């Protein structure tokens, strides 16, 4: 799929088909995620891949529907290295930004593969850490269930550019 087509086709879904993802498909998604840009190439992300019966634990973390996806990525920062490099507080921000770029790469690759996902930002952090034994050095940024959509999802309206863009300086 061409990049522009993937950007335009990407959408969120909360309903997945029964099709499981293969290990190779999951590896493709993670490879795309790790090709994202990162501050000073620190690559301060870490991904937990939750499949099988372990997905049922998401009912204790966020919403039960999340467990219906064939795979759920727990997307974390591992920011110790970058925070020590930028001791003025910027390191934590860079780590979250890096992880966000990786998440978008993963979503675009999923779209390219005929899959989709839904970024979950509302979850119980403590329950997630407890249920999935996430070490303290990994800070959970988002949950990302991914799979084949159960049904086509119509595109949602987007605000026009003139509502969300301000030009400063020469506009060419």
Image: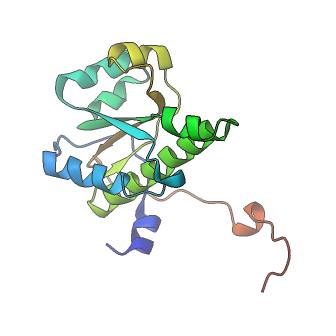
Quadrant holding the C terminus: bottom right
User: Which of these two is toward me, 65 or 60?
Assistant: 60
Which image quadrant is residue 60 in? top left
Residue at image location 17% in from the left, 28% down from the top: 52
Residue at left offset 43%, top offset 47%: 43
From the top left corner, tell me how far across and down residue 37 is, in percent: 47, 58
Q: Is residue 125 above or below residue 121?
A: above
Q: How is the image coloured?
A: rainbow
- x then y, percent, for residue 15: 33, 40
Residue 156 on image: x %, y %:
53, 56
On the rendered structure, is 47 left or right of 154? left
Whether residue 22 appears in this view of the structure is: no
**Residue lying farthest to the right in this orientation:** 169
Q: In which quadrant of the rendered view does residue 21 lie?
A: top left
- Compared to residue 14, the image places residue 108 above or below, namely below
Residue at 49 percent across and 37 percent down: it is: 81
Q: In the shown orientation, is residue 17 left or right of residue 36? A: left
Q: How many marks?
A: 0
Q: Dividing the image into 4 quarters, which one contains the N terminus?
A: bottom left
Q: Observer-nearest residue: 116 or 155? A: 116
Any part of residue 10 in sight: yes
Q: Position of residue 95 (x, y in %)?
A: 54, 41
Q: Residue at x 27, y 20 (%)?
A: 56
């Amino acid at each position: 799929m061409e990049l522009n087509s993937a950007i335009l086709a990407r959408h969120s879904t909360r309903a997945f088909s029964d099709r499981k993802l293969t290990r190779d498909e999951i590896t493709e998604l993670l490879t795309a995620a790790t090709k994202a840009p990162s501050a000073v190439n620190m690559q301060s992300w870490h991904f937990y891949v939750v499949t099988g019966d372990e997905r049922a634990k998401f009912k204790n973390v966020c919403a039960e529907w999340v467990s219906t996806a064939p795979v759920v990525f727990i997307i974390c920062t591992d920011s110790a290295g970058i925070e020590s490099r930028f001791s003025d507080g910027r390191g934590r921000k860079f780590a979250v930004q890096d992880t966000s770029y990786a998440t978008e790469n993963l979503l675009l690759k999923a779209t390219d593969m005929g899959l989709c996902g839904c970024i979950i930002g509302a979850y119980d952090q403590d329950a997630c850490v407890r249920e999935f034994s996430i070490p303290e050095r990994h800070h959970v940024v988002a949950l990302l269930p991914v799979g084949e959509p159960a049904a086509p999802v119509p595109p949602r309206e987007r605000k026009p550019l003139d509502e969300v863009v301000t030009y400063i300086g020469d506009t060419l």
